[in-house]
Amino acid sequence: MIRKHYNSIAILLAFFTIATFIGCEKDVSELQVGIENVYIPQSFSVTTSDNNYAVPGGVNFGDAKNFRDDEANNKLEIFLGVSKSGKETTAPFTVDVTSRPDTINQLVTNGASFLAVPSATYTLPASVSVDSGQSTAGFSLLVDKNALKNYSGKKVAVCVAISNPTKYSLRLSASQVIVIIDVDALKLK
């Protein structure tokens, strides 16, 4: 009889212990969720899944554009960026920025409908830093307008990639973007 009461009390005690732990769990809305990855946001597109970024592109709503015609410096400035996913507050980090002409050459060899922009005609920053508390930072691909005008009637491309984040993981599927420039659609001055 005592053993029966002991088992009942043990079960009751276990039940209250479990209920206490369940009651201490955070509400889902209080949890910090998401995978902390670093990526190029322009590598995502509603219309493609191959990291292509058209310039001028479909993001043009009214006066908003994904490029700027810098007449004073005779450059085409293409807006790009680095972002971090996840809900945690961002600690500062830096990524390296490079171009990958070999990627463009491979695509051209495989029948792409664009040509490679010669690397001597464009510049990129060597790195980009995202400040503490921020989830994104912008940078620009600067292309010489005179060089672009030599490709009238054509599309040209540059592959821009990020690597070596000082914090967080790199999202490999979105670590590079193929910037495809439709020279005639730019209506350069």
Image (cartoon, grey):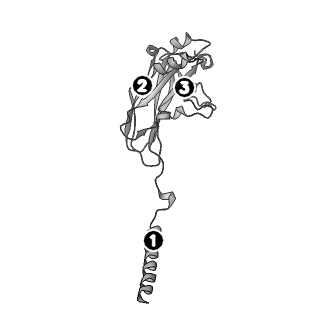
Q: Is mark 1 on a helix, strand or loop?
A: helix
The earlier-in-sequence mark between 1 and 2 is 1
Image quadrant containing the N terminus: bottom left
Quadrant in the rendering for residue 166: top left
Does residue 106 appear anywhere in the picture? yes
Q: How far apart are marks 3 and 1 (CA)?
A: 58 Å
Residue at the image point whose x is 43% and y is 78% from the top: 13
Three-letter code, disc 3 = Phe
Residue at the image point whose x is 50% and y is 34% from the top: 173
Q: Nearer the viewer, mark 1 or mark 2?
A: 1
Q: Nearer the viewer, mark 3 or mark 1?
A: 1
Residue 105, image x, y percentages: 50, 17
In the picture as drawn, the residue positioned furthest to the top comes out as 150
Residue at the image point whose x is 44% and y is 69% from the top: 21
Three-letter code, disc 2 = Thr
Does residue 75 appear anywhere in the picture? no
Say whether marks 2 and 3 touch (CB < 8 Å).
Answer: no
Residue 109, image x, y percentages: 54, 16
Name the foreground residue: 12 vs 169: 12
Q: How crowded is mark 2: few (under 14 residues within 10 Å), some or many (20 or more)?
A: some
Q: Is mark 3 on a helix, strand or loop?
A: strand
Q: Residues within 10 Å of mark 1 (few under 14, many from 20)?
A: few
- Identify the residue position indicated by label 3 in the image: 67
Q: Residue 98 carries which label?
A: 2
Q: What element carries label 2?
A: strand
- Identify the residue position indicated by label 1 in the image: 18
Image quadrant containing the C terminus: top right
Report the side of 46 relative to 103 (left or right): right
Name the foreground residue: 41 vs 62: 41
Three-letter code, disc 1 = Ile
